[in-house]
Every structure is written in structure tokens, then in C-alpha cells.
Image (cartoon, rainbow, N blue to C red):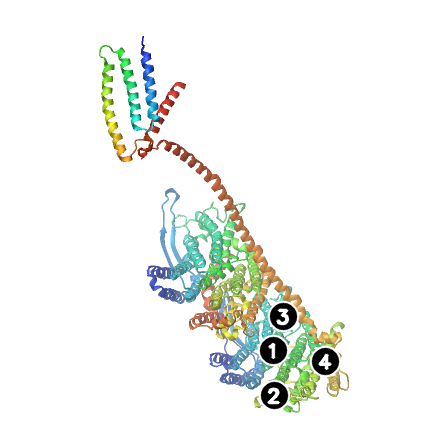
């Protein structure tokens, strides 16, 4: 039997992998993938905790919203990455340090 | 007391003022004249002195043995005291007026010839007029303050004239010495005058020393210490001006000036000023002080006479004889022979002036020979002279008369005055302890010494063979008596050296008309000395002269050895200059050096020490400031900066670092939450 | 406009004019300065001629007896319960000031003429010169202590720059030494001024006051104040009035200068350019002695009279010490600087005698030294400008090379060494008369002091004659050879015109001392009366 804590464990694992990818990868696409992973860990949590609201299914509902928003932000992020690449000829986030000003 | 004028006296006073002012005018005119050799200068000065002479005869006739004339005007007010400037004409000042102008006149005439070729002819007469002005003013002023003024001006003009040839080092050294030594005397006089002033609150000579002398009054009298201090001051003044021991050494050196100047200033007038001062303030002295004067005068006379014996410089011999005769005068004052002393002052002025003029002629003529023949000789050295009577008979006779008067032989003026002093000295010693007998005896011996050196001078210069010819046979002796400017003064002075001018009785000094003018101190009754002394004195003097004749002309007796101590002692002028040099000048200069060192090292050193302490303190404070106080400030700043740097390191613009730090912070918050 | 204020501020006005003019007109600055000093001289002579004498115009401690007075309220702050601050612009003169004013004006003209030698930064020089002029005149006129102090300090600033910028090789050293020395004295003086201010009340208004004349009246002191005569307060364990006197005396003694506070003087005089040396020696030193007479004696007469012995002692030490030092110098200017120390010693000795003769003599000596020191420093400047050397040993026989110059040197030297007929003789003689009189009349001095002073007279003859003999007589021989021989030309017309009036003034004052004594005598008598009745 798969319990709630198994879902949570998986979600935490996904989150950690995503976090690791975000912090270490030198490629903006990979970072984006990491973000997706972390997002999906959060969505998984939403769905898993949805069992406590069986009437409104607000957990699933939020998950759907989140997935849709994630798709939108991903599209936006890819557009940003493309523009970054156009300007800097690189998508290594460590080489882009203009954010400090 | 503002102006107690009497109509009759006004004219006399005006004339007296004119006598004084005329030379001053001459001085001013000459100073403004153009051209160094302007011959006008000589005439201006001579004219002034001729007029002064005429006027002084008038003044003399009005004042001599009549009431004194005293007029004054307010000079200035200081404090509550009014100072007056005025003219005091009595027997003494009238006589001195006459003397000074009568000596100055021949000297002026003589100078026109003597200085004819000098490059600074004008300057000479300018100075000479300044001197005449100061000297004439000195004798007529009525206040001690003015007396001091002219006393020092006389010294100043003498300074100028001694250093007339200022490119000669010896002349310049001599005038410096003369002025400084005279300054010592001046300061003495100033001290004495101030002491008298502070006690009696007046400078008026008439009030102080006149008929009702304040100094003799019982109500106001000087305390003992002051009395002697005042005497000491006046003595210094007299010693400096009249070249008495111990301040006499400037006079021989002063012979560096032109000879005509020596004749006027350093033989007849200025050096007599000291004796004149004694005459003016005579009532001030008490018995002990007079004794001191007698002793010093006698010592000076003797010392100078011994020195004169061995000198070879013509003018130096005469200078020492002047000192010696001045010693006689001071001694005369000391023994109470007031009138004889002044008498000797007058007679001495004439014959000594004449002797100097003679010396001037001789030197001048020898200079010409020296220049004409390019000889390397000292024109003043009597050893190169000799036999000059053939070339200059007139001068020789003048010198003979002068010499006789100086020795004090009968029929000359010197006999009348000098014997008077000696006789009174014996009278005076009679009333005292036996110790005082030495004074007249020494004076007597001095007279014989005088006879010897005068004879030596006369014989060496005018008799015997001409040493110059002996040494340089090729020299042509172009020597003569000179023109009327030389002859007239000698003639005039020569007459004044003979007895009729002063007394109709050639062998009795008591009958001189001059002495009648000074009944100040009564002449003592006739004693045995009045007969014995003149005879003994003159007989032995003649013997001495004959002895000198044997030594120097006949060469019958051998000359004196130059090696013995007495000769050296005399030749080196008693080593007095050397003593001064070693014990006064050197220590003073050393003291000056020490003071300079003190100033630089101690006082300024102290200032610098303060400066250094200040700097060291400043350095320490600076160190503290830099490393401790500023250190703390820096530390705080450094901490702030490192924190800032640390915080800034997060702001590196790299997204992943930002995320990482967020993670760390969140973890930290969790840890914090867990632990607390 | 008050004539006295006009006298004080005329130079300042001209100074402002110079400051505003463009530098292209720099050649006219010296003429403007000369004009300013001449105008000033004219005013002071006018004042001298219109100065009223007599016992009713004596001045000293009676306000109504001062002449050409001007009194304007200047700073009057209402301090509420503390009363009112009362600082007046208060100027006025009495007999002692008038002679010094005329003397200073003459010296200023001479200094302006001597400024012809200044070649660089003319605008700065002449502006500072005129500022100094205003300050100096102001000191002699001020009767309000605050005003006095302002003028007194105002002198320092221009002098510091004048020495420090236009001076000789060691000018910075000399300027700083001079500045610190003087400041040392005046800073403590300020403390005493404030104490006096707090002690004295103007009887008419009841406020504290800086009025010097009111400070002289013991009735104006608060009964319990520090300096009140009867309160016998102490400061630092000593009687307060003595402390006050000593501090003020030290401040002025530095200026005089009195040994051992004199070492700024040789350096400052030697390094300063000729016009500044002239002002220093001619006027600045007199401000010291003027301050002693007006302030120390005026405000603390009781202490002054009882410390006569010490004042006299310092005077005699200055005379002898200065003279001996002068004897050992080989720099002509230094020699003259030390002779100033010696001659100013006579001033102190005369003042210390507390007799009418002595103080009259002291003032005479101040006036006379003003002219003679000016003359001497000008004469040194003449040689220095020609060959830039002042060492006595490097010259010989200048008498043949520069006869006119030698005549003036002889006049200046003989006048300075006290030859009768010149003013210094009158000054020194009466200072000595005072010194001799003092032991008998007020017992302040002792006999040997007077005798010590007399010995100074002999020494002064020694050093002046030695210099004359060494430098001017003998046959010509110069260290610089023919170069110097062509450089050492005789006096120019400008120099002769400058020197002649000085020589004549010294002579005229020597023959007619009443020109000075007539003006000062009443004031001196009033001062003596005032001191002796304390």
C-alpha cells in the first residue's frame, strides 16, 4: 500500500534533485528543467494532500492551475533564455552577472 | 631768576656769545663749502678766530678783576626743575677765553701753510673750527650740564682731528683709543655732575661753586660716600682729558694727528681743560682729595719725565713733557697752589704750543726731503736730525726759548709759574707729615729730568752734526724756516714766553698780574723756600743741561747703555699700555665673547630647548594620535568595511549564488528555529 | 571725523586702494604708500602743533584730560542678569602718546622710502605694510584695553608675513620665532585683561568695562574682585595684583626687549628686509616700553613702585649685556640689533627710577632711539643692498670709497653712543639722573645700578668706534675685490633725502629737548604723582 509519506518522500527527492540541478548546472535549459522538477515536486505534494479534501478536490485543482502556470512560465523562461543567448552568446548562468547592478 | 639782565653786561655777554658762535659759523660754512682743497675754508676759519680774538680782548678787559657777568635763559623744563643755559664770565673764564683764542690764532695761521698740500684741506679747517667752538664754549658756559656737553664735544673734535688721516691705521687706532679713554673720563664727569645735581638740584656753576658756594654750605652737603664718588668721577675726567696717570696713554698716541693739531689741542687747550675743570669745581674738594690730586699729579709728572728721557720720536717727547707739565698743574691744584697752577696752565700753553709748532716745521721740512729723495726714514725720529740750526736759525731760537721756558730758567714765563708751584709745594709739605715731603722733592727731581730731556731734544735736533747727511751724503738739504705763516706764529708765541708778558719782575713769581686775579686761595707768606728753591733748582738745572751738552754734543761722556732695566722701563713707557692690553682690553673682549656665547648657547639655547621639548611633545602626541586614537577609528572603519565586503560578496549578480544563499538562509532559519 | 581716527585709519584706506588696484600698476604702489605715510605725518604734525600742554591736559589717569578723544560704543551685548558687555572704540592721546605718534609717523615715512628696495610681490608687501602702520598707530592711541589688544595682535600678522616672505636666508625661522615669542606674552596678557574686565565696573553705568583709565582708579574695582586693591586676593599662591603686573610686564618686556627675553630680536632684525627692520627697531620696541608706562605702571602702580628694584636690575642687565654682545658681533646688523637692546635698557632704567627726570629721560630715549635706530638700520640696508654682505671684517676703508655714507654713519654712530648735542645723550643722561636720584628720593634703585648704566655708556663707545675703525677707516680693502668696488657707490639722492631729516631731527632734539620735554613733562609729572600717591 502506498502511503502519503511515500508521496512526500518522492516529492522531497524530486525537490532536492531540482534544487541540486538549479545550483550546479551551467546551462540555463538544465536550470529550467531543475525548476520544472521542483515545481512538479510541489504539484505532487498538492495532489498527495488533496486526499484531505475529497469534496472540493481543491488539491487537484491547484495542481492543474500550477501545471498550466508552469507551462506559461516555462515558455516565458525559454523566451528569456533565447534573448539572453542573443545578447550574451551564452546560456551559462554563471557568466551572466549583470544582476548585481 | 628768569633773567637778571643788567644793561652793561648784556653787551659783554653778547660779545662772549659771538666769540663762541663765530667758530661754529665757520664750521657750518666750511661744511657746506664745495671742493676738498677749497682754500676759502682756511680763510673762513682764520677770520672767525681773529674776530674771536679781538672780541675776547674786549671781554677780558670788561671782566678781569671786575664783577662777574652771569646771564642765562631757560633751556628746558624737566620734572619740576628748570634747566638754564647761560654764560658765566669771571676771571677764570675770561682768561681762558683769551688764552684759547690767542693760541688758536697762530695755529690757524700756521695751519694754512702746514696743511696747504693736503688733499682734505677743507675738512681740516672744518674740524678745527668745530674744536675752537667747543673749547671756547666749554670755558664760558655756566652750567655743569652744558659744561659736560662741550667737554665731550671737545673730545669728539679731538677724535676727528687725531684721525684726520683716516687711511693710516695707526691714526685710526689712536683716535679710537683717545675717544674711549676720554669716554671713561666723561662717564666719571657725568656721574659726578649727576651726584652734585641730585644733592643740590642745580647745574649752575656759579651757585654751586661761586661766591656763596652751595657745596660749602652746611645745610646741604654731600654724604661722605657721594663726596668721594663725585671726586672720583671728576678725577677720572681730569685724568682722561689732562692725561694724568692712569689714563694718560692716549696722549702720546694722539700725536698721529697733524702737528698743528697737536700744538693746539694736545698741548695747549684741550688737555688744559682738565685743569680748568679742577679750577671750576675747586671748592668741592676736601683735604684728602686734594692730597690725592697732589700725589697723582706728582706721580704723573715724574713718570712722564722719565719716559721722555728715552723716546726718539720728536712729538712723543713733547707729548710726554706735556703730560709731565700737566702733572705739575694737577699737583699744584692739590697742594693749594691754585693760582700758580692756573698760571702755569697759561704759560705752558704758550711755550708748549710753540714747541709743537717748531716740531711741526722740522718734521714738515724733513718730510719734503724724504719725498724729494725717496728716503726710507721716519721724519719724526730725532736720531736722524742734528745740526739743523744752520738751516733754520729762526726756528732754532724759537725752540731755544720754548725749551728754556719748559725747563723753567729765569727770564722766561715758565720760571715764574713753575717755581711758584714748587715753592708752594714745599710750603704745603711743611705743614704735613714727613711722608708728604716726598712730593715736592720728587717734583724737584722731575724738574731736573725735564731739563735733561729738553736739552737732549734741543741738542739732538739743532746742534751737533747732521745725522741725515752722515747716513745719506747725497741728500741735498733744502731746509728753511718757511714763510711768514710759520714765522709769525713763532714770533708771537715766542714773545708770550718771555717774562715781561706776565710780570715785570723777572725773578719773582709773586708779582705776576695773573696771580692777582685769583685771590681764591691766599698765597702763603714768604718762607725760606721762596729764595732757596729757585736758586737750587736753576743752578742744578743748568748743570744738568751742561751734562747733556757733554753727552750729546761734545760726546765727551759716553751715552747711556740701552740694555739696562731702567732704560727699557722708560723706553717702553712703564709698560702701561701693555698692562692695559693684557688686563683690561683682553678681559673685556673675552667677556664680550663669553656673553655672546652665553646668549647663543644658554639663552637662545634655552629657547631652542623649549622648542625641542615642544617638538618632542608634539611628536609623542602625534604618535598617540596616529596609532591609538586614530587606530581605534580605523579599527571601527575596518570592521565596518569587512562586514560590508562580506555582505557585498553575495551581490555578485549570479542567479545561482543568490539561490544558494537563499537556501542557506532558509536552512539557517530552520536550524535557528530548531535549536531555540 | 575725529582727527585721531583719521590718523589711525588713513593707512588702512590707502592699503585697501592698493589692494583693489590691478597689479599692472605695481610701480605706483610705493608712491601710494609714501603718500599715505606723508599724509599721516602731516596729520600727526598738525596734532603736535595743536596739542595743548599744561597740568590740566596731563592725561594719564583722568579721562577728561585726554585730547583728540573719540569714544563710540562698539560691542554692547546685553547679557541679561550678567549685565552688559561694554567695549568701546575709545581713542585719545596725552603727552606721552603724542611724541611717540609723531616719531612713528616719521619712521613710517622713512620705512616707506626704504621700501624702494622691495622688488617682488609689491601688492602684498605694501598692503601689509599699511595694515601694520594702522595697527601700530592704533596701539599708541587706544584707551580701551580690548581695542588696545586688537591693535596689538593686529601688528603680529603683517609682521609675520613681512619677515617670513620678504626676509633673508633664515626668514621662516626668524618669523616664527618672533611670532611665537610675542604670542607667548600676549596670550597671557589676554587672561589678565579678562580678569581686569571682570574686576572693574564703570561707575556711571555699572557695567564691567575695558576702559584703561577706569582701570587705573582703585575705586572702580569691585570690592571682592581678583584685582581689587584691598581684597588681597591671591593667584597661584602669589598676590593677584603682582601676578597681573608680572604677566603684563613680561608681555611688554618681550617687545622692548628686556634681557633675557630678547633673542627674537637679533634674528628678526637680521632676517627682516630693511623697511621692516626699521619699523621693528624704530616703533615696535617703543610699543613695549609704551605699554609698560601706560598699562603696567598705570593699572598696577602699587606693584610697579615696589618692584622698582627688579625693573632697574633688568634695565642694567640689558644695558651691559646688550653692549657686551654688540662688542662681540661681526655682523653689522646684529651688532646694531644688540645695541638696540642696550639702548632700550636705558628706557627701562629710567622708568624704574620713578622720578620725573628718569621717566622723562626714558621717553626721550624712546623717541631718540626711534630716529637713530631707523637711521642705523637704513644705513646697514644701504651696504647690504649693494653687495649683499654685512660682515664687518669684509670691509675696510669705506671712508674713501663712500665719503657721504661715512659721514652719515659717523653721525648715526656718535649720536647713538650719546654724543652731547644729539638726542640720545639727553635721553641717556636723564635716565641716569633718574637712576642716581632714585636711591635718595624713593629708594627704588641702588647706586651701583646707576654706575652700571654709566659703564654701558663706555662700552657703547667701544663697539661703535671699533666698527668705525674696522669698516670705514684705514686703506680700502674689500672682500669682494673690484666687483664690490664698483657696486659700492655712494649714497643716492633718495637715500640722502631719507637720512638727512633723521640726522637733523636727532640734532634738533639734542639741542632743543624741550620739543619733547615740553609735551611730555606734564603727563610724566601726573604719572609720578599718581604712582607715588598710591
The residue where tag 3 is placed is B236
Label whose residue precedes the other's in the sequence (3 or 2) = 3
Residue drawn at 62 percent across, 78 percent down: B255
Disc 3 is attached to a residue of which chain?
A: B
Q: x and y percent of residue C389 in the render?
A: 50, 66
Q: Nearer the viewer, mark 2 or mark 1?
A: 1
Instruction: Answer with left or right where residue B540 lies relative to residue C429.
Output: right
CB atoms of marks 4 and 2 within 8 Å: no
Q: CA distance from mark 4 to mark 1?
A: 25 Å
Disc number lying in front (4 or 1) = 1
Closer to the camera in the image, A15 or B544: A15
Q: Which of pointers 3 and 2 indicates the residue nearer the eye?
A: 2
Question: Does label 4 or label 1 sit earlier along the sequence?
Answer: 1
Q: Is residue C143 above or below residue B357?
A: above
Q: Earlier in the sequence, mark 4 or mark 2?
A: 4
Mark 1 or 3: in front is: 1
| Label ID, residue B490 | 2
Hey, which residue is sitting farthest right in the picture? B557
Helix, strand or loop at mark 1: helix
Residue B400 is at least partly visible in this image: yes
Mark sitting earlier along the chain (2/1):
1
The residue beneath circle 4 is B449
What residue would you read off at disc 1? B256
Picture disc at residue C453: none
**Residue C52's x, y, as percent?**
41, 65
Amino acid at each position: 500500500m502506498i502511503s502519503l509519506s511515500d508521496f512526500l518522500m518522492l516529492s522531497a527527492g524530486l525537490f532536492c534533485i531540482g534544487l541540486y540541478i538549479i545550483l550546479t548546472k551551467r546551462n540555463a535549459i538544465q536550470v529550467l528543467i531543475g525548476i520544472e522538477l521542483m515545481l512538479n515536486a510541489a504539484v505532487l505534494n498538492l495532489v498527495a494532500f488533496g486526499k484531505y479534501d475529497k469534496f472540493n478536490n481543491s488539491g487537484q485543482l491547484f495542481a492543474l492551475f500550477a501545471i498550466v502556470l508552469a507551462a506559461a512560465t516555462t515558455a516565458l523562461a525559454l523566451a528569456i533564455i533565447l534573448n539572453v543567448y542573443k545578447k550574451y552568446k551564452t546560456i551559462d548562468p554563471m557568466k551572466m552577472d549583470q544582476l548585481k547592478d | 631768576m628768569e633773567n637778571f639782565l643788567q644793561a652793561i653786561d648784556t653787551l659783554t655777554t653778547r660779545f662772549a656769545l659771538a666769540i663762541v658762535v663765530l667758530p661754529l659759523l665757520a664750521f657750518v660754512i666750511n661744511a657746506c663749502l664745495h671742493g676738498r682743497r677749497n682754500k676759502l675754508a682756511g680763510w673762513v676759519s682764520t677770520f672767525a678766530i681773529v674776530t674771536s680774538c679781538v672780541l675776547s680782548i674786549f671781554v677780558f678787559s670788561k671782566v678781569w678783576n671786575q664783577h662777574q657777568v652771569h646771564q642765562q635763559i631757560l633751556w628746558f623744563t624737566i620734572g619740576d626743575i628748570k634747566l638754564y643755559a647761560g654764560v658765566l664770565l669771571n676771571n677764570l673764564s675770561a682768561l681762558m677765553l683769551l688764552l684759547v683764542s690767542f693760541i688758536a690764532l697762530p695755529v690757524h695761521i700756521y695751519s694754512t701753510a702746514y696743511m696747504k698740500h693736503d688733499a682734505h684741506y677743507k675738512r681740516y679747517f672744518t674740524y678745527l673750527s668745530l674744536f675752537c667752538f667747543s673749547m671756547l664754549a666749554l670755558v664760558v658756559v655756566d652750567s655743569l650740564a652744558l659744561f659736560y656737553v662741550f667737554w665731550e664735544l671737545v673730545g669728539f673734535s679731538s677724535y676727528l682731528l687725531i684721525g684726520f688721516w683716516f687711511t693710516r691705521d695707526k691714526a685710526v687706532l689712536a683716535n679710537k683709543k683717545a675717544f674711549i679713554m676720554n669716554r671713561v673720563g666723561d662717564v666719571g664727569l657725568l656721574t659726578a655732575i649727576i651726584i652734585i645735581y641730585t644733592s643740590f638740584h642745580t647745574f649752575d656753576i656759579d651757585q654751586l661753586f661761586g661766591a656763596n658756594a652751595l657745596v660749602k654750605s652746611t645745610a646741604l652737603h654731600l654724604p661722605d660716600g657721594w663726596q668721594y664718588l663725585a671726586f672720583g668721577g671728576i678725577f677720572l675726567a681730569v685724568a682722561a682729558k689732562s692725561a694724568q696717570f692712569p689714563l694718560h696713554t692716549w696722549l702720546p698716541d694722539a700725536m698721529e694727528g697733524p702737528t698743528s693739531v697737536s700744538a693746539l689741542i694736545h698741548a695747549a687747550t684741550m688737555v688744559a681743560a682738565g685743569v680748568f675743570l679742577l679750577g671750576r669745581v675747586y671748592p668741592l674738594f676736601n683735604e684728602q682729595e686734594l692730597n690725592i690730586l697732589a700725589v697723582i699729579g706728582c706721580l704723573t709728572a715724574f713718570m712722564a719725565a722719565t719716559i721722555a728721557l728715552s723716546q726718539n720720536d720728536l712729538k712723543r717727547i713733547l707729548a710726554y713733557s706735556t703730560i709731565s707739565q700737566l702733572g705739575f698743574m694737577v699737583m699744584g691744584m692739590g697742594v693749594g697752589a691754585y693760582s700758580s697752577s692756573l698760571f702755569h696752565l697759561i704759560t705752558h700753553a704758550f711755550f708748549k704750543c710753540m714747541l709743537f709748532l717748531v716740531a711741526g716745521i722740522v718734521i714738515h721740512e724733513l718730510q719734503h726731503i724724504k719725498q724729494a729723495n725717496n728716503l726710507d726714514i721716519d721724519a719724526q725720529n730725532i736720531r736722524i736730525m742734528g745740526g739743523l740750526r744752520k738751516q733754520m736759525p729762526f726756528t732754532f731760537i724759537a725752540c731755544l726759548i720754548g725749551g728754556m721756558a719748559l725747563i723753567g730758567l729765569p727770564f722766561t714765563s715758565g720760571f715764574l709759574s713753575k717755581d711758584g708751584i714748587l715753592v708752594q709745594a714745599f710750603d704745603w709739605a711743611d705743614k704735613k707729615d714727613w711722608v708728604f715731603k716726598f712730593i715736592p722733592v720728587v717734583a724737584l727731581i722731575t724738574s731736573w729730568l725735564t731739563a735733561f730731556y729738553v736739552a737732549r731734544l734741543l741738542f739732538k735736533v739743532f746742534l751737533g752734526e747732521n745725522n741725515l747727511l752722515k747716513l745719506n751724503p747725497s741728500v741735498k738739504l733744502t731746509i728753511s724756516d718757511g714763510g711768514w705763516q710759520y714765522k709769525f706764529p713763532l714770533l708771537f708765541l715766542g714773545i708770550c714766553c718771555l717774562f715781561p708778558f706776565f710780570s715785570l719782575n723777572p725773578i719773582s713769581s709773586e708779582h705776576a698780574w695773573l696771580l692777582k686775579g685769583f685771590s681764591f686761595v691766599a698765597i702763603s707768606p714768604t718762607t725760606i723756600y721762596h729764595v732757596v728753591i729757585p736758586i737750587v733748582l736753576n743752578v742744578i738745572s743748568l748743570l744738568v743741561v751742561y751734562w747733556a751738552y757733554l753727552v750729546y754734543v761734545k760726546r765727551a761722556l759716553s751715552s747711556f747703555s740701552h740694555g739696562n732695566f731702567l732704560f727699557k722701563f722708560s723706553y717702553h713707557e712703564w709698560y702701561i699700555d701693555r698692562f692695559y692690553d693684557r688686563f683690561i682690553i683682553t678681559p673685556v673682549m673675552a667677556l664680550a665673547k663669553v656673553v655672546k656665547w652665553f646668549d647663543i648657547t644658554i639663552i637662545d639655547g634655552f629657547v631652542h630647548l623649549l622648542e625641542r621639548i615642544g617638538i618632542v611633545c608634539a611628536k609623542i602626541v602625534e604618535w598617540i594620535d596616529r596609532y591609538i586614537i586614530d587606530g581605534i577609528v580605523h579599527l571601527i572603519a575596518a570592521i565596518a568595511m569587512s562586514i560590508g565586503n562580506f555582505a557585498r560578496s553575495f551581490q555578485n549578480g549570479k542567479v545561482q549564488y543568490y539561490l544558494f544563499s537563499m537556501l542557506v538562509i532558509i536552512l539557517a532559519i530552520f536550524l535557528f528555529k530548531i535549536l531555540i | 571725523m575725529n582727527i585721531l581716527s583719521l590718523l589711525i585709519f588713513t593707512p588702512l584706506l590707502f592699503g585697501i586702494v592698493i589692494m583693489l588696484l590691478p597689479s599692472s600698476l605695481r610701480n605706483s604702489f610705493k608712491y601710494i604708500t609714501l603718500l599715505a605715510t606723508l599724509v599721516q605725518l602731516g596729520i600727526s604734525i598738525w596734532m603736535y602743533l595743536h596739542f595743548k600742554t599744561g597740568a590740566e591736559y596731563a592725561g594719564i589717569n583722568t579721562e577728561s584730560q585726554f585730547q583728540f578723544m573719540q569714544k563710540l560704543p562698539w560691542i554692547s551685548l546685553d547679557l541679561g542678569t550678567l549685565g552688559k558687555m561694554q567695549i568701546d572704540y575709545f581713542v585719545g592721546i596725552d603727552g606721552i602718546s603724542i611724541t611717540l605718534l609723531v616719531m612713528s609717523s616719521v619712521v613710517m615715512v622713512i620705512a616707506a622710502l626704504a621700501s624702494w628696495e622691495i622688488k617682488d610681490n609689491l601688492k602684498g608687501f605694501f598692503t601689509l605694510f599699511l595694515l601694520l602702520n594702522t595697527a601700530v598707530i592704533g596701539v599708541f592711541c587706544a584707551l580701551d584695553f580690548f581695542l588696545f589688544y586688537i591693535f596689538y595682535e593686529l601688528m603680529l600678522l603683517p609682521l609675520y608675513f613681512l619677515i617670513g616672505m620678504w626676509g633673508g636666508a633664515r626668514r621662516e625661522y626668524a618669523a616664527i620665532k618672533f611670532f611665537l615669542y610675542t604670542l607667548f606674552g600676549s596670550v597671557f596678557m589676554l587672561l589678565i585683561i579678562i580678569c581686569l574686565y571682570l574686576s572693574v565696573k564703570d561707575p556711571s553705568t555699572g557695567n564691567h568695562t575695558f576702559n584703561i583709565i577706569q582701570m587705573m582708579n582703585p575705586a572702580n574695582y569691585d570690592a571682592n574682585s581678583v584685582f581689587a586693591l584691598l581684597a588681597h586676593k591671591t593667584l597661584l599662591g602669589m598676590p593677584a595684583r603682582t601676578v597681573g603686573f608680572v604677566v603684563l610686564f613680561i608681555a611688554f618686556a618681550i617687545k622692548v626687549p628686556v634681557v633675557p627675553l630678547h633673542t627674537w630680536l637679533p634674528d628678526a632684525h637680521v632676517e627682516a628686509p630693511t623697511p621692516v627692520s626699521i619699523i621693528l627697531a624704530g616703533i615696535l620696541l617703543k610699543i613695549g616700553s609704551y605699554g609698560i608706562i601706560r598699562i603696567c605702571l598705570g593699572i598696577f602702580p602699587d606693584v610697579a613702585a615696589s618692584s622698582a628694584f627688579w625693573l632697574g636690575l633688568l634695565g642694567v642687565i640689558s644695558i651691559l649685556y646688550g653692549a657686551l654682545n654688540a662688542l662681540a658681533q661681526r655682523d653689522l646688523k646684529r651688532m646694531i640689533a644688540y645695541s638696540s637692546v642696550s639702548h632700550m635698557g636705558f628706557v627701562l632704567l629710567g622708568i624704574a627710577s620713578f622720578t620725573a627726570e628718569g621717566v622723562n629721560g626714558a621717553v626721550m630715549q624712546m623717541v631718540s632711539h626711534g630716529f637713530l635706530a631707523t637711521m642705523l638700520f637704513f644705513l646697514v640696508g644701504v651696504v647690504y643692498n649693494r653687495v649683499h654682505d654685512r660682515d664687518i671684517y669684509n670691509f675696510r676703508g669705506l671712508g674713501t670709497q663712500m665719503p657721504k655714507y661715512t659721514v652719515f654713519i659717523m653721525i648715526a654712530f656718535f649720536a647713538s653712543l650719546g654724543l652731547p648735542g644729539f638726542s640720545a645723550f639727553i635721553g641717556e643722561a636723564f635716565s641716569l639722573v633718574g637712576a642716581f636720584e632714585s636711591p635718595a628720593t624713593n629708594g627704588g634703585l641702588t647706586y651701583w645700578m646707576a654706575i652700571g648704566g654709566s659703564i654701558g655708556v663706555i662700552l657703547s663707545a667701544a663697539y661703535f668706534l671699533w666698527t668705525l675703525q674696522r669698516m670705514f677707516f684705514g686703506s680700502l680693502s674689500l672682500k669682494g675685490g673690484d666687483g664690490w668696488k664698483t657696486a659700492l657707490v655712494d649714497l643716492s639722492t633718495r637715500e640722502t633725502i631719507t637720512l638727512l631729516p633723521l640726522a637733523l631731527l636727532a640734532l634738533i632734539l639734542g639741542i632743543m629737548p624741550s620739543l619733547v620735554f615740553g609735551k611730555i613733562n606734564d603727563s610724566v609729572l601726573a604719572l609720578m604723582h599718581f604712582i607715588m600717591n598710591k
